[in-house]
Image (tube, helix red, strand yellow):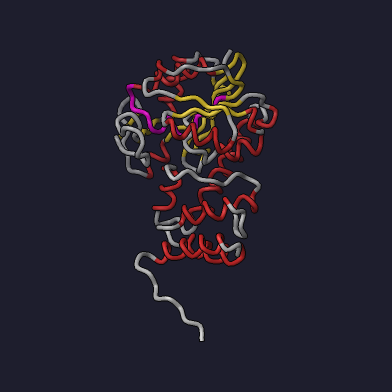
Amino acid sequence: MTMTSPPSHGSSGAQLLEEGRQLLAQGDRAGAAQVLTRARADRSALLEAHALIEEHALVGSFTNMTGLDCRISPSDDIFHFFAGHPSSLNPLRDYFADGWRTLSELMLLLEAVDRPLLRTPRVLEFASGHGRFTRHLVKALGAPRVTVSDVVPSAVEFARDTFGVEGFPSASRPEDVRWPGQYDLVFVLSLFSHLPRSTWSRWLRVLQDAVAPGGLLVFSTHGVKAADFDSVTLDAEGFFFAPSSESNAIDAHEYGTAFTSEAFVLKEIAEVWGPDALQHHALVHFWNHQDAYVLRKA
């Protein structure tokens, strides 16, 4: 009869992680894959189990299934948002699918202005976070064509180390950003949906300097559908801001949650970029609740 040791104290996820590490040390990859897959189902052990599966390319690896680099930073606020959301039954799959969905929605948007993403030589992903979308962009374009920037230094470091892209730090004050170059496409997903009124227009202005002549700026906003869903009333200017967001790394008064009307955004574009800058806009385009705007630099 085989004797088993009594269960150790702690969560089942922690026990499974330890068992998985022991099996890896013994060279039992198949056994480790089975145990770590069970550990991955425990929210408390999910990210550590995922990291081990990806690091050792075990059965169940998302990298093996998708061809993406599927490493996730432990500091990734967006991943933790999925992992903590009651509607997310499979946070890893939801997180990776969300990045893929963003890629497809960006490609559709650029096709509408006859500027295909795959033919874009230099792309800057601004306010890039820890790579939820970056990994998909790199698979589509290759790392040499992608640059990232974020106000959180560790996010930029993670993207550089993990995906092989160029990266540089952003800043809290728009005017403090130092652009290392200009880009044919600057993609700013869900930054303007978090900015207070004091910096909203300023960011729109300084981002012009990052766009090469004839290049595009694509950005998204929380529009009327999002405001209605959250029962938010816009002010007379068509704006609302609350100092709250999913990010724990940035001051909520700098990066909260903003809602804007279409009229507000179009007015700001005309005043800051000029009346001919807008090439296209699509309401409720990204994630079925964010509006999208495409501007061209003359």
The image shows residue 151 at horizontal and vertical percentages of: 42, 28
Instruction: Specify whether 67 is left or right of 21.
Output: right
The range drawn in magenta is: 186-198
Task: Determine which quarter of the picture holds residue 109.
Answer: top right
Q: Quadrant of the C terminus?
A: top right
The image shows residue 211 at horizontal and vertical percentages of: 56, 18
Give the vertical position of 133 relative to 173 (above or below).
below
The image shows residue 131 at horizontal and vertical percentages of: 52, 38
Q: Main secondary structure of the magenta part?
A: loop
> Extreme bottom residue here?
1
Of residues 267 and 35, which is closer to you in this image?
35
Of residues 260 and 185, which is closer to you in this image?
185
What residue is rendered at 66% in x and 33% in y? 141
Instruction: Specify whether 197 is left or right of 130.
Output: left
Instruction: Specify whether 281 is left or right of 191.
Output: right
Give the vertical position of 276 relative to 128 (above or below).
above
The image shows residue 197 at horizontal and vertical percentages of: 33, 24
> Extreme right residue here?
119
Of residues 148 and 288, which is closer to you in this image?
148
